[in-house]
């Protein structure tokens, strides 16, 4: 799932990229049919509002990165911490300390900067949320690694 998330996150240039988005206006861009991806940030705090189709599980990293080597991930994950909540309840997270990922990036994207097939080593703390019931929900994503911080709050309308 990590490679699919990176492909989603790198499909758009910064102006329409869902990871760079500060409002949620771009959250529906390039979503697959079987899950709904959420994102943290490229660093910093955001509040996003999104409409999510019913019946879609959510996949979101609390903190993640893609680098050139296992050493990049080892350094990043050494101090990584994170949490995800859905309506105030903790979401269990999976630790991926390193995994080779290959994804196709779009032009001028803020992830790799170049278009085309990209191979790297991905890592992070990942949450998967079963499809939320119709209605309003709040997902809060926090993550840190060294001085890098992620703080994203989503108000989701599922329906």
Image: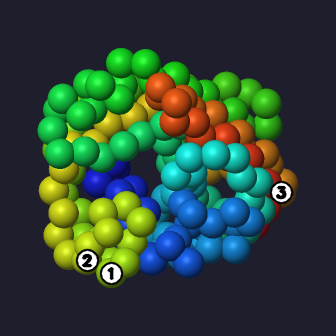
Q: Earlier in the sequence, mark 2 or mark 3?
A: 2
Which residue: 39% across, 34% down? 124
Q: Tags 1 and 2 in contact by the CB under 8 Å rule?
A: yes
Q: Residues within 10 Å of mark 1 (few under 14, many from 20)?
A: some
Q: CA distance from mark 1 to mark 2?
A: 4 Å
Q: Is residue 10 above or below residue 115?
A: above
Q: CA distance from mark 2 to mark 3?
A: 37 Å
Question: Which label was assigned to residue 98?
Answer: none
* Nearest to viewer (mark 2 / mark 3): 2
Which residue: 16% across, 56% down? 119
Q: Earlier in the sequence, mark 1 or mark 2?
A: 1
- Position of residue 145 in the picture relative to residue 3 (left or right): right
- Specify the farthest residue to the right: 136
Q: Which residue is mark 2?
A: 115
- The front one of 56 and 23 is 23
Q: CA distance from mark 3 to mark 1?
A: 35 Å
* Nearest to viewer (mark 3 / mark 1): 1
Question: Which label was assigned to residue 107?
Answer: 1
When asked about the image quadrant of residue 109, the answer is bottom left
Q: Which residue is mark 3?
A: 135
Q: Secondary structure at mark 2?
A: loop
The spot of residue 20 in percent (x, y) is 57, 63
The spot of residue 54 in percent (x, y) is 67, 63
Answer whether residue 66 is visible to the viewer in this image: yes
Q: Is residue 38 above or below residue 115?
A: above
When asked about the image quadrant of residue 129, the answer is top right
Q: Residues within 10 Å of mark 2 (few under 14, many from 20)?
A: some
The spot of residue 99 in percent (x, y) is 21, 38
């Amino acid at each position: 799932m990590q490679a699919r998330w990176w492909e989603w996150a790198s499909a758009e240039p910064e102006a329409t990229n869902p990871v760079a988005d500060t409002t949620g206006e771009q959250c529906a861009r390039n979503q697959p049919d079987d899950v709904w991806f959420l994102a943290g940030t490229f660093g910093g705090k955001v509040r996003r509002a999104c409409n999510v189709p019913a019946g879609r599980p959510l996949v979101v990293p609390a903190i993640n990165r893609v680098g050139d080597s296992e050493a990049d991930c080892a350094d990043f994950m050494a101090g990584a911490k994170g949490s995800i909540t859905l309506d105030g309840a903790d979401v269990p997270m999976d630790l991926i300390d390193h995994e080779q990922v290959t994804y196709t990036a779009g032009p001028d994207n803020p992830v790799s900067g170049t278009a085309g097939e990209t191979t790297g080593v991905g890592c992070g703390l990942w949450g998967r949320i079963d499809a939320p019931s119709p209605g309003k929900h709040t997902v809060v994503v926090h993550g840190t690694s060294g001085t890098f911080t992620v703080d994203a709050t989503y108000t989701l309308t599922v329906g």
